[in-house]
Amino acid sequence: MRLLIVEDDPALASALENALQRRDIQSDVAATIEDARHMLGVAQYAGVLLDLGLPDGDGLSLLRELRVENNAIPVLAITARSALDARVTGLNSGADDYLTKPFEVDELVARLHAVLRRQGGLSGSTLTAGNLSFDTVSGDLMVEGVPVILSARERQLAGLLLRRLGQVVRKPLAEDQLYGLSDPVGSNALEVLAYRLRRKLEIARASVRIETIRGVGYIMREPTPPPSP
């Protein structure tokens, strides 16, 4: 998944981005409401980690804008405001959850996964297709119970394709989720990544297959059942 972190403290934003990266969660950082508006307009995110005290206004104003626009993107509000009325205001403004600084990254990730499951962004902790299973929390992928060693981005692509099993994942969406706005993306980076993942699944004798829809994107398909006699 790829998240948008809206946080004006550069040290905190960098620490949070790095901590999430170590958990195979990619992120982009916006330091202001205006930057966040722009980034939400040009990229697709699984969720938003939203600080409320920002240089150009209250983060709740951005949250209210999203909800007025019927944008249901999951938002986890992060703030130093610990008073009950502040938390209630945040939740009433449309936040899906509320976390008070300071916090542990593991708690943030657990709350984030819970919010995404409620929103349908994650369909449980384990996804299965054919003889393949994928743990959405740990990123472990197994074929018939045998682990398949994948790089971080290979795991992310596998999860993206599995969550949309049988559907075409368009190339711009995949690039947004895997690379985002701050990472340089070569013209054939996604093609190389898909090829590596496909080869590893083939070597592991996974029954699913990854197909390239030329000029459009990629699709993961389950095995076709044999015809009835």
Image: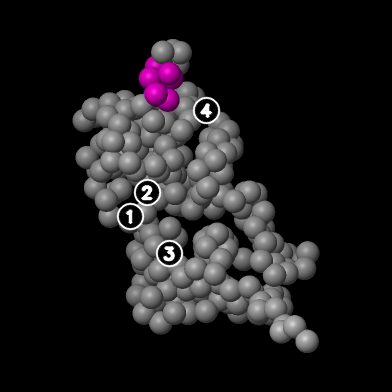
Tell me which label, 2 or 3, sits earlier in the chain: 2
Q: Are marks 1 and 2 in contact (CB under 8 Å)?
A: yes
Residue with the mark numbered 2: 28
Residue indicated by mark 3: 174
Disc 3: CA contacts within 10 A as few (<14), some (14-19) or many (>=20): many
- The answer for how far apart the CA atoms under marks 3 and 4 are is 30 Å
Residue 16 pos. (x, y %): 46, 39
Q: Main secondary structure of the magenta part?
A: helix
Q: Earlier in the sequence, mark 1 or mark 4?
A: 1
Badge 3 element:
helix
Q: Residues under labels 1 and 4: Cα distance?
A: 27 Å
Residue for badge 4: 103
Whether residue 18 appears in this view of the structure is: yes
Residue at 59% from the left image edge and 51% from the top image edge: 123
Numbered disc in front, either 3 or 4: 3
Q: Which residues are magenta?
A: 86-92
